[in-house]
Amino acid sequence: MTEYKEVKKVTECAAPELPAREEGLCEPLTKLGEGSNRGDDATNKFSNMLAKGSLDSVLREVRQETKGLNRKNVVPFLGTDAELVEAYEKHQEWQRVNQLDDARYVPEPFRKRQLRLTSAGELLDADVPPRETMLWPWFKVGDAAMIYAPAGLGKSFLTLTIAMAVAGGGAIKGLNWRVEKPATVLFVDGEMPTPDLRERMKTILEGGWIEGLDVEALRRNFSLFARLGQPDDDGFIDLANPEHHKIIGNHAAKAGVELVIFDNLSTLTESMEDENNSVQFRAINGFISMLKRQGVSVIVVHHANKEGFAYRGSSAIAVIYDSIMQLGKLNADEDDGEATRFRLSFEKSRAKRTPETASRVVSMESFGYAIADGVERDEKLASVVRIVKAGEHERLSKRNAEAVFDLNALTIWKKVVIGLDKELIEADEVRAMFSCPPADVKAALASAYQRANEAGRAKADSALPSLVDDEDADF
């Protein structure tokens, strides 16, 4: 006997979702006689139904009846025959109760899920730990990022390097992106032959691309789900199909996956008819949101458009991501034509800016990544930023500044201007450190204060404070 609880009226209730098979890709329905994990009763019920008609006709009728159970009205059903019949019977019970004049009683499985409302007081008083960083300095646990580039520019290689670093810990050489705590990674590849993936992994390992990598942790934490590694070509993950989201979601929950990488969006959305239609991306964005709610981080690899200056498809795709990284083509004078080179830049990033996330020309060498537009200049910028941010010195003269930074004055000011323009350092930090900056630094300070005003980070009537030249007027 089904037990009922007194809840809201049926008109305020929603039909349940269809149960889904937890493993496998659109597997065929279990044939009669193979048994079911729902038990003999469900199988017997199915047998009784089958006696009324052929297998195909009965299942077709049941599927038609159970369409209303799915909010998006999407079929096929991914369960066994017995599970399908059970869902059908639950649906019939729900319809029967819904027809009552005074429907105060609704079966427990059919009650509508309530949304949670949190007050400001509850939020402020809640003991919510800060999110950990998965890949310093720009990627946190629960983040979603997109990496896009034209074909053949190294986006898959870079993403594989990131995946291996997250799985095994360590720092990506040249880029200085670091992983303190290894995490479990699921790499979903839609186009690369498995032998090629293996060769790329060996290149990264043998070349020492990741400093401090724990190979044993990598072997445990990294798992690959590759289209061309399947025993047959009977379908693969399609991110445009909501039914396939359950496969990844269930696997991530069961295996404790902490990072899922999809490489790439074009090869993993076969059913998408028009990638310029924003509606087509709603299901994908919803799926990524679901993974983020589970605490699973996501990286999606995508292609650039024909011009190479933007990602392909609707702008709606960008809404869900915390970071968007572009690997852009170089000008003729920047490309030596020998090594693979690209300009790495963040179009969007919710992380605090650092020298490690500044726009840079990157070269892929046999030993890993290298900054092709001047490692020395970047290192000097990083050094200047670190010293200014530390705030351990005040009102430095020209001579004292050169001693503190171990750089000549001209180099210091160039790096300070770059740091202000890229918002790596704050105007107040610069004012507090130097006694009499030159004209170009004053101009950069004025621009920084103006940006702060426009962004609401300073009072609307604030102006450039007086910068008095005291002991180094020749600066």
Image: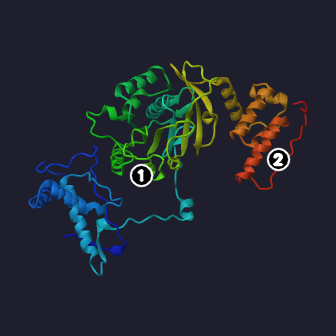
Residue in front for this viewpoint, 36 or 429: 36
Q: Amino acid at mark 1?
A: Ala
**In this view of the protein, can residue 432 be seen by the observer?**
no
Residue at (79%, 25%) from the top-left corner? 408
Residue in front for this viewpoint, 120 or 372: 372
| Residue 420 marker | none
SS for dot 2 = loop
Tell whether 468 sits left or right of 100: right
In the rendered image, residue 374, in percent from the top left (x then y), is placed at 65, 24
Tell whether 182 sits left or right of 94: right
In the rendered image, residue 37, in percent from the top left (x then y), is placed at 19, 52
In the rendered image, residue 33, in percent from the top left (x then y), is placed at 10, 50
Q: Is residue 91 above or below residue 188?
A: below
Q: What is the distance, in whole Å, between disc 2 and disc 1 at their CAs?
A: 48 Å
Which marked residue is nearer to the observer: mark 2 or mark 1? 1
Tell whether 159 sits left or right of 256: right
The residue carrying mark 1 is 283
| Residue 464 marker | 2
Q: Amino acid at mark 2?
A: Leu
Q: Quadrant of residue 41?
A: bottom left
Q: Residue furthest bottom?
A: 101
Residue at (52%, 34%) from the top-left corner? 149
Q: Quadrant of the N terminus?
A: bottom left
